[in-house]
Image (tube, rainbow, N blue to C red):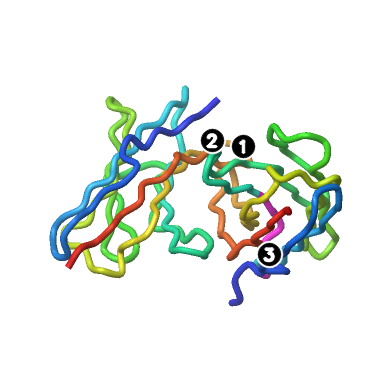
Amino acid sequence: AQSVTQPDIHITVSEGASLELRCNYSYGATPYLFWYVQSPGQGLQLLLKYFSGDTLVQGIKGFEAEFKRSQSSFNLRKPSVHWSDAAEYFCAVGARNDYKLSFGAGTTVTVRA
Amino acid sequence: KAGVTQTPRYLIKTRGQQVTLSCSPISGHRSVSWYQQTPGQGLQFLFEYFSETQRNKGNFPGRFSGRQFSNSRSEMNVSTLELGDSALYLCASSIPAGTYNEQFFGPGTRLTVL
């Protein structure tokens, strides 16, 4: 069974600074990996996804993530955060021919002025 | 194209009652999944439907059930509500396309059980 670990529960970053959120997954085969963002009281919005190919994927809102098979990681990055990036971020893993996502516990990002 | 819609958005029930939540997927999407989100357990998969058939089910008691209609709309039902059922219930739809499953989420239904 697949599982996801997000080691950081809460991160505080200054506006304009860079951001990196960590995600480690456990899955025997090639996983399908996703990052979602959730603003308070809202559903989940897909930021980016990795299925295969280029290990550096670009997403919406200036986010990118890098798949590293050797480290079982899929870390999310943004070079310069904006106050509107304050939200909760979830890493998720799916499997080939499976129909469910397994989510990490989430990382809450606070942006200070 | 309209997104995933969920009704109602907020619901207050008392213990022992039952509740039905509704989800309308994105037009053309035939797979609907349900997730429960709580502060303690995070996001947990409930079940997934495709063409009116349940294809996958998470580890939830039988009080949680669902169904899908021919127009792909889905409902989930929780009977004999418990305090611990208070959660945000999220519905997600996908096409699905081939072997992967990119899911698009609705805004959720916030259920409070008193």
What residue is shown with label 2?
A95
Q: Which residue is mark 3?
A: B25
Residue A98 magenta-drawn? no
- Write the residue at 46% across / 26% down: A27
What is the secondary structure assignment of the residue under circle 1? loop
**Which residue, as the protein is rendered here, is positioned at the far bottom?**
B1
Residue B21 position (above or below residue A1):
below
Chain to which mark 1 belongs: A
Q: Quadrant of the C terminus of chain B?
A: bottom right
User: What range of the chain is rendered magenta?
Assistant: B27-34
Whole-angstrom CA distance, mark 2 to mark 1, is 5 Å
Check contact, mark 2 vs mark 1: CB within 8 A: yes
Tell me how far mark 1 sits from mark 3, CA to CA. Answer: 19 Å
Q: Position of residue A56 (x, y in %)?
A: 26, 47
Q: Nearer the viewer, mark 1 or mark 3?
A: 3
The amino acid sitting under disc 2 is Ala
Disc 2 to disc 3, how far (Cα)? 22 Å
Number of numbered discs present? 3
Mark 1 on the same chain as mark 3: no
